[in-house]
Image (cartoon, rainbow, N blue to C red):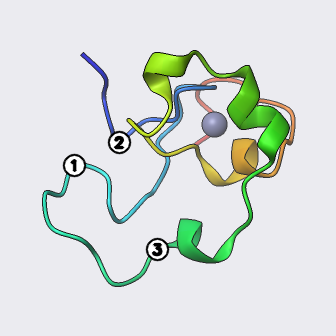
Amino acid sequence: MTDSSRCPRCGQLNRCAQAGKAEAVEDCWCFHSPVDAAVLDSLPAEQRDRACLCPRCAQGLPVEPQGAD
Ligand SMILES: [Zn+2]
């Protein structure tokens, strides 16, 4: 089962306002930040549209070590 509050790429909290909510939220960082298409392409198909990427991964930045948050 996918944890929608965590980034499928790095496992950090994605801080997405929409994560885990059934109703549409009005605002979230991900509505404003372009997501790197190469990152989306690198995800398994079953993880796309399931959980938001974290802000770093959305920009295609290197994955942070666990525990940095
Ligand atoms: Zn991430």
Q: Earlier in the sequence, mark 2 or mark 3?
A: 2
The disc labelled 3 sits on which kind of residue? Cys
**Marks 1 and 2: CB-CB under 8 Å?**
yes
**At x 76% / y 34%, what residue is drawn?**
39
Q: Which residue is mark 3?
A: 28
Q: CA distance from mark 1 to mark 2?
A: 7 Å
Image-quarter location of ligand 1? top right
Q: Which mark is residue 61?
A: none
**At x 72% / y 41%, what residue is drawn?**
57
Q: Secondary structure at mark 3?
A: loop
Q: Earlier in the sequence, mark 3 or mark 1?
A: 1
Q: CA distance from mark 3 to mark 1?
A: 13 Å
Residue 64 seen in the figure: no
Q: Secondary structure at mark 1?
A: loop
**Marks 3 and 1: CB-CB under 8 Å?**
no
Q: Is residue 4 left or right of residue 34?
A: left
Q: Look at the picture and state if 49 lies above or below 65.
A: below
The disc labelled 2 sits on which kind of residue? Ser
Name the quadrant containing residue 22.
bottom left
Name the quadrant containing residue 31.
bottom right
Give how far across and how far down residue 27 sits, in percent: 41, 82
Q: Is residue 30 left or right of residue 65?
A: left
Q: Is residue 8 left or right of residue 4?
A: right
The disc labelled 1 sits on which kind of residue? Gly
Q: Determine crowd level at label 3: few under 14, some 14-19, many 20+ residues with C-alpha closer than 10 A.
A: few
Q: Which residue is mark 2?
A: 5
Q: Which mark is residue 20?
A: 1
Q: Quadrant of the C terminus?
A: top right
